[in-house]
Amino acid sequence: MTKILTFLFLLFLIFGCKKYDNSNNNIDEMHLQSNKKAEDMPKFAIVIHGGAGTILKENMTDSLELAYKNTLQEAVKTGHEILKRGGSALEAVTKTINIMEDSPLFNAGKGAVFTHEETNELDASIMDGATLNAGAVAGVTHIKNPINLAYEVMVNSDHVILAGKGAEEFAQLSGFELVDPSYFYTENRFQSLQKIKDKEKTQLDHDGKTAYTDSFIKNSKFGTVGCVALDKNGNLAAGTSTGGMTNKRWNRIGDAPIIGAGTYANNATCGVSSTGWGEYFIRAMVAHDISAMMEYKDITLQEAAYEVIQKKVPALGGDGGIVAIDKEGNIAMEFNTAGMYRAYINTEGELFIGIYKD
Ligand code: ASP
C-alpha cells in the first residue's frame, strides 16, 4: 500500500511540476508577445513650448498659472490626437501651434509683443524632417496664424523665407484672409512696451545717450511658441511662431523664422524648436547645432541639447531654451532661464506640463 501511495505521489510530482513549468512558459511567451507588440507599435510623441524667460512662481497668480496650464494641455492634446489617428507630424505641429497663436497668453499671433513703433510684426517657420523642406515668414503684420503661411511657403512656393509685404502678397494669392493689425492688440503687451519706453526715457535723461540696447535686452519678455512631433510613420516636424521681442525696431528679425536657429527637423536625428534671445540663437545656430552634434558626435539628444543650451549659448551671453524629439521619440526640454512654459505627451502616452525650473 505504501509503495502504491509513494508511486502515486511521485506521479503527481512529475506531472504537477510539468504542468507548472508549462504554465510558466506560457506566461513567458505571452510576455514576449506583448513586448513584441509594443515594439511593433509605431511610436509617436509631441512636445511644445510657450516661451522661456524670467518666469517666477512669485510673480504668478493661481488663476494665470491655471490658464497657462490649460492652454498648454489643450494644445499638446490636440497635436497628440492628430498623431494618434495617424495624422502627419506636420499637421500636428501646425494645429498645435494654432491653438497657442490664438491665445492671448503667448507671444505669437494674438498676444504678440509690440515693436518700438507700436505695431506687431510676426515671424514663423516650419520644417519637415522627412524631406528637409522648410518654409518661413518674417515681419508679417496681417496674418492671423503665421505658422500656416510658413507651411504654405514650404509646400507651395520655390522659396524658404518670405518677408513683410511680399509674404502678405503671397498669402493673398494663396487664399489667406488678411486680418486688420488691430486684431493683435492686447492691453497687457501694449503696457509692457510702454514700461520699456519709460525706462528708455529715464536712462536718456540720466546719461544723455541712447539706452535702446540696454532696455531692449533687459526688459524684453519672451513667450514664443513652438512644437515638435514624431508621427507614426517615423517622420519628424518642428515649427516655431513668435511676435519677436518687445520694443524691437528697424524690422528686426529674430531666430524663429531662421531655419537652423529657431527651427530644425531631420528624420535622421531630431526636431528642435527654440525660444529665447534670438540674436544669440542665430549666432549659435542652436537648432541645427543640436542635430549636427547628434549626427557627427554620435551623442544623445539630451547630451546635445545640454551642450548647446547650458554651455554654448550662455558662453556667448544669450539665454533661452529648446524643446526637441529624436527619431526614437526621446524628448528633451532644456532651458537656462528661470522657467519655460512647456508640455509633452511621450511615446508611453504620459502627459507632462511644466512652467518653472523644478
Ligand atoms: N526667440 C524670439 C526672438 O528672438 C523671442 C522668444 O523666443 O520669445 O524673436
Image (cartoon, rainbow, N blue to C red):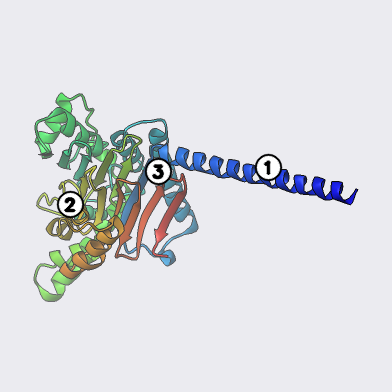
Is disc 3 surrounded by few (<14), some (14 to 19) or many (20+) residues within 10 Å?
many
Q: Nearer the viewer, residue 113 or 300?
A: 300
Q: Which residue is most to the right?
A: 1
Q: Is residue 76 left or right of residue 118?
A: right
Q: CA distance from mark 3 to mark 1?
A: 49 Å
In the picture, the disc for residue 19 is 1
Q: Identify the residue under disc 2.
A: 288
Compared with residue 57, is residue 271 higher up or lower down, i.e. above or below?
above
Asked if residue 229 shows in the view, the reply is: yes
Q: Position of residue 88 (x, y in %)?
A: 32, 33
What amino acid is at disc 3?
Val
What amino acid is at disc 1?
Lys
Query: Which quadrant of the view contains residue 306?
Result: bottom left
Q: Residue at x 16, y 40 (%)?
A: 137
Q: Residue at x 36, y 44 (%)?
A: 46
Q: Identify the residue under disc 3.
A: 76
Nearer-N-terminus badge (2/1): 1
Q: Which structural element holds mark 2?
A: helix
Q: Which structural element holds mark 1?
A: helix
Compared with residue 173, is residue 49 higher up or lower down, i.e. above or below?
below
Which label sits in the foreground, 3 or 1? 1
Q: Residue at x 28, y 44 (%)?
A: 185
What amino acid is at disc 2?
His
Q: Residue at x 23, y 51 (%)?
A: 114
Q: Position of residue 240 (x, y in %)?
A: 25, 45
Query: Which quadrant of the view contains residue 133?
Result: top left
